[in-house]
């Protein structure tokens, strides 16, 4: 069972999605990864969709800084972004 302290680079897509979507509750309607390439190599883009009126959040894991973040840190960024979006309305 995941605790949230695991680093993104050590987990597969399904483990990340399950932990984040369960942790975000009913607010999260869909989550998926897009796999991409650029001049730096292969990377993944996390898409988390929420109930309306919130937008889809996209986070790229394309460098060591991003890949060394924990699940809890990623969840905090998503929740902070939602708060900011709510305040702008």
Image (spheres, rainbow, N blue to C red):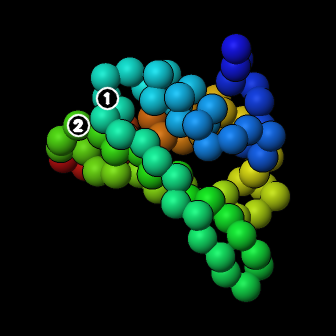
Q: Quadrant of residue 8?
A: top right
State the residue at coordinates (36%, 40%): 30
Element at label 1: helix
In this rendering, position of residue 67 left or right of residue 75: right
In this rendered view, identify the residue nearer to me: 72 or 3. 3
In this rendering, position of residue 38 left or right of residue 10: left
- The x and y percentages for residue 33 are 52, 53
Residue ID for mark 2: 51
Q: Is residue 76 visible?
A: no
- The x and y percentages for residue 76 are 55, 34
In this rendered view, identify the residue nearer to me: 64 or 34. 34
**Vertical side of 59 occupied by 30: above or below:** above
Which quadrant of the figure contains the N terminus? top right
State the residue at coordinates (52%, 60%): 34
CB-based contact (under 8 Å), mark 1 and mark 2: yes
Q: Residue furthest top?
A: 1
State the residue at coordinates (60%, 71%): 36
Sequence-wise first label, 1 or 2: 1
Residue neighbourhood size for the residue with mark 2, other residues' Cα within 10 Å, grouped as few (<14), some (14–19), many (≥20): few
Q: How many marks?
A: 2
Q: Quadrant of residue 7?
A: top right
- The x and y percentages for residue 37 are 65, 76
State the residue at coordinates (68%, 24%): 4
In this rendered view, identify the residue nearer to me: 70 or 15. 15
- The x and y percentages for residue 6 are 77, 30
Q: Residue furthest bottom?
A: 39
Element at label 2: loop
Residue neighbourhood size for the residue with mark 1, other residues' Cα within 10 Å, grouped as few (<14), some (14–19), many (≥20): some
In this rendered view, identify the residue nearer to me: 41 or 62. 41
How far apart are labels 1 and 2 at the CA level?
6 Å
Label for residue 27?
1
Q: Is residue 13 visible?
A: yes
């Amino acid at each position: 069972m995941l605790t949230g302290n695991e680093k993104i680079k050590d987990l597969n897509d399904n483990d990340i999605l399950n932990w984040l979507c369960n942790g975000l509750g009913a607010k999260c309607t869909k989550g998926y990864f897009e796999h991409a390439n650029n001049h730096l190599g292969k990377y993944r883009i996390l898409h988390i969709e929420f109930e309306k009126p919130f937008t889809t959040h996209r986070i790229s894991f394309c460098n060591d800084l991003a890949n060394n973040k924990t699940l809890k840190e990623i969840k905090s960024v998503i929740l902070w972004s939602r708060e900011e979006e709510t305040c702008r309305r």
